[in-house]
Image (tube, rainbow, N blue to C red):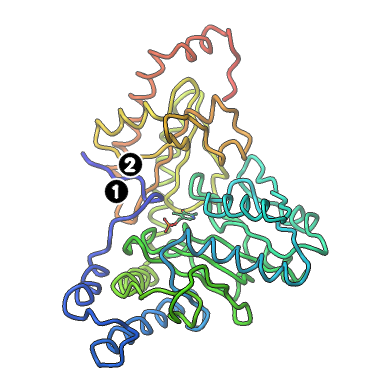
Amino acid sequence: MNVYADNAATTRLSPVALRAMLPYLENQYGNPSSLYSLGQRAKEAVETAREEIAAAIHAAPRELTFTSGGSEADNQALRTAAALGKKAGKTHIVSTAFEHHAVLHTLKALEREGFSVTLLDVHSDGLVRPDELAAALRDESCLVSIMYANNEIGTVQPIAELGAICRERGVLFHTDAVQAVGHLPIDAEAANVDLLSASAHKFHGPKGAGFLYARRGVRLQSLIEGGAQERGKRAGTENVAGIVGMAAALSERIPRMEQDAARVSALRDRLIAGLSEIPHAALNGDAARRLPGNVSFCFEGIEGESLLLLLDDRGICASSGSACTSGALDPSHVLLAIGRSHDVAHGSLRLTLGEDATEAEVDYIIQNVKEVVERLRGFSPVWRDLVSGKTPHIL
Ligand SMILES: *Cc1c(COP(=O)(O)O)cnc(C)c1O
């Protein structure tokens, strides 16, 4: 059996989105800035897509700027708020330790430019406490950036409540909603956000397309010098097919979202129950306040990478919290932020179900994770020490 259980990394392109895109990759290849009808048809397609996406998140079309994806939208949101803050003499930013690197690395860059950053505790349940946000705000705060839903552990923050605190204090509020858009109902107005990032490939749209919502009155600062596309907020010829595909994918998700979320949540809970039977294992993040498809576990005495390779042999695509880049094994900053130890964080597994997931797939995953964890523990000196009592169990 082949099971794709890494939908937080990316999703399969919807056939509806693909069909919507094809004309703009074939005959409708005009540049939206051109005045002849071939160009104007491309322009109309971009503007129709803007209207569709705006309707899907209860925003006005003018409030949306198309970007190359979530990372660019996050960068632009933070850069905009920082520039506005600096102009007003406000250089303090509040965020959390478990944001996506597109946010965390931009914050690091802003720190080097003189901003000070407070990272809120996300507690062991993966949730921010609104009273702690209120306490962290200062007169010189210019921005709060808190993700809607976490990409590793799936926890969903009380965004409207956090946003209300920011609004009351007159501080701009950005949320990275890349994991939420297309999966949870999003109302940009009701969520009390000023800036919101999204990415098409996380909701069955194409890679390389995303958008940044900026509430009217918040003037975005362009990251790219060039032409006057996107009302001067994002230079460069529009990714017409990508934008059209993004709108088609999101429009397809909206009427199905509630039903899909209920069905996928039930499968998620079945998967959590099955994996919880493994001894010395623990779910990461709150069990209820999480994305419909997200299951994140830590297993004592194993390495996440070995687990992934053995699961791949059995046809299962999953992910581990640990980012293995250039041979350096760094445990996930998200798992460390919720208080997992380095050792435990190394034994992590993220399974993210799509809308087409089935009970048979979930049962196949449970069976195989159980077998593979047991097998890996059989070889593991760390596990031997835990079993013999030489080192104490944490989970
Ligand atoms: C995937 C992801 C991003 C980055 O989006 P890209 O379109 O891949 O640049 C940002 N934030 C979160 C939470 C994500 O899951």
Measuring 42% from the left and 83% from the top, which residue is drawn there? 51
| Residue type of the residue flagged with mark 1 | Thr
How far apart marks 2 and 1 lie (CA) works out to: 6 Å
Residue 28 vs residue 319: left or right?
A: left
Give how far across and how far down residue 17 sits, in percent.
Answer: 27, 69
Is residue 272 shown above or below 140?
above
Q: Nearer the viewer, residue 229 or 330?
A: 229
Give how far across and how far down residue 338 sits, in percent.
Answer: 62, 39
Give how far across and how far down residue 30 sits, in percent.
Answer: 25, 82
Query: Which residue is situated farthest in the right direction here?
Result: 139
| Mark 1 residue CB less than 8 A from any atom of ligand 1 | no
Is residue 174 shown above or below 29?
above
User: Quick check: marks 2 and 1 in contact, CB under 8 Å?
Assistant: yes
**Displayed quadrant of residue 389:** top right
Element type at marker 1?
loop
Q: Nearer the viewer, residue 216 or 121?
A: 216
Measuring 37% from the left and 26% from the top, which residue is drawn there? 306
For label 1, the residue is 358
Element type at marker 2?
helix
Q: How many marks?
A: 2
Q: Quadrant of the C terminus?
A: top right
| Residue type of the residue flagged with mark 2 | Val
| Within-10-Å neighbours for mark 1: few <14, some 14–19, many 20+ | some
For label 2, the residue is 362
Query: Which residue is situated farthest in the left direction here?
Result: 27
Measuring 42% from the left and 46% from the top, which residue is drawn there? 268
Query: Which residue is situated farthest in the bottom direction here?
Result: 36
Is residue 58 shown above or below 309?
below
Measuring 44% from the left and 29% from the top, which residue is drawn there? 277
Q: Name the quarter showing ligand 1.
A: bottom left
